[in-house]
Image (cartoon, rainbow, N blue to C red):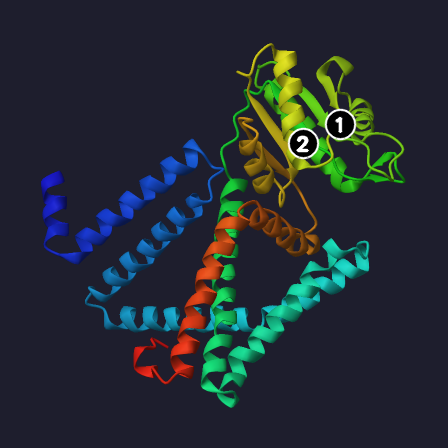
Amino acid sequence: MLNEIIAFFGRRGEFFYISVFMLVMFFVFLISWLVEPRRLINGVFFTIFLASVVIWITVMVHKSTSHGLQRAYDLLVLAAFFLITALLIFAWFFLFWNAYFVWKYESHTLPNLLTLIFGFVALILSLIFLFGPGQYLPRWLSVLLASIPAIAIYLGLVLYNFLVNLLLYQIYPRRYKQDYLIVLGAGLINGDRVSKLLAARINRAIQYSNRQYQKGRKRPIIIMSGGQGPDEKIPEAVAMAKFARKRGIKTNHLLIEDKSKNTYQNMLFSKRLATKDFGGSNFKAKFFSNNYHIFRAALLAKEVGLKANGVGAFTRFYYLPNAIIREFAGVFVMHKRRHFVIMGVIVLFFILQAILVATGNIKFSVI
């Protein structure tokens, strides 16, 4: 039977090699993701696998004898291409629409204006793409300005890879065998009350704890992690613990980490607290935050050597685009040296091209 299958694929030449490549990429991605989901390269592996699936389907359809199927598939691919192009060109409209809802329902702080800022950037890039103002400028300047959309494309690819990893991280398998559940803090209302956003994180951890206990395993210790901000009356962790006790969590199943000021310190100080309580670092832990935040938090947990993956709590849909942009910016800054080097190379390439054009050495230019 196996020989017959191999012979079947072998008679179809490239179809066999594409099939093998697709399967190899699937297992490369799957193993890499399951072993360590906190790696940005997982998004690259998944994208290569996805592209190989599309190529596999395309070859399979065009090797079929059904011309109707081939025409229908080609029309579907063409429609998908125009849809994606339209979405990219008019992304500014969605961003402005989302900015309106964030402005209406949330505080008017700079982090909550990110979709508005990105909307203006997307609108400017769309106008450049549609009208091509470079045709009215000297050619060398037009070549130099071409570095702007080139950098935008690079940033778009980086954003895409971040989104893929963020989505994949949401479905990472949960194992109900944890010693500690770390809940990441957030700002308090009036300086002493848990907000809806923070309550969602705590309730998700309590739900996880109850589920683990229902499976016949020990109830994990919940670590409330969050220090006291300048506008807060008490540490966030203290308010969080009070909230959890009202929902039935006993005091002996709670630990308070009340010194951290950011997510990095949440992870570092919670790791130290768990290590001290457990008597060593060989404990199992999960951390809890909102779904848009867990991937960046996971990268920070990896930085401090905390072997823990995250579980996300529900977030209102209108808030997600703004929050995801903020998270992307945070991950971008974590790897800023790499990104600035690549963007520097892109700019240098276009500067050299502009110099070639300006000095009349057009024949050496690749643009």
Q: Are marks 1 and 2 in contact (CB under 8 Å)?
A: yes
* Residue 103 place in picture, x, y as percent: 78, 60
* Residue 276 place in picture, x, y as percent: 64, 13
Residue at 42% in and 38% down: 33
Residue at 59% in and 27% down: 286
Left or right: 154, with 234 as reference point: left
Residue at 77% in and 15% down: 251
- Which residue is disc 1 drawn over? 259
Marks 1/2: CA–CA distance: 8 Å
Callout 2: helix, strand or loop? helix
| Residue 132 appearing in the image | no
Name of the residue lying farthest toward the top:
279
Three-letter amino acid code at the position of disc 1: Lys
Q: Quadrant of residue 143?
A: bottom left
Three-letter amino acid code at the position of disc 2: Gln
Give me the disc on residue 93: none
95 over 326 or under it: above or below: below
Name of the residue lying farthest toward the front:
359
- Which residue is disc 2 drawn over? 265
Residue at 51% in and 76% down: 145
Binning the other alpha carbons within 10 Å of mark 2 as few (below 14), some (14 to 19) or many (20 upward) gives some
* Residue 337 place in picture, x, y as percent: 52, 49
| Residue 236 appearing in the image | yes
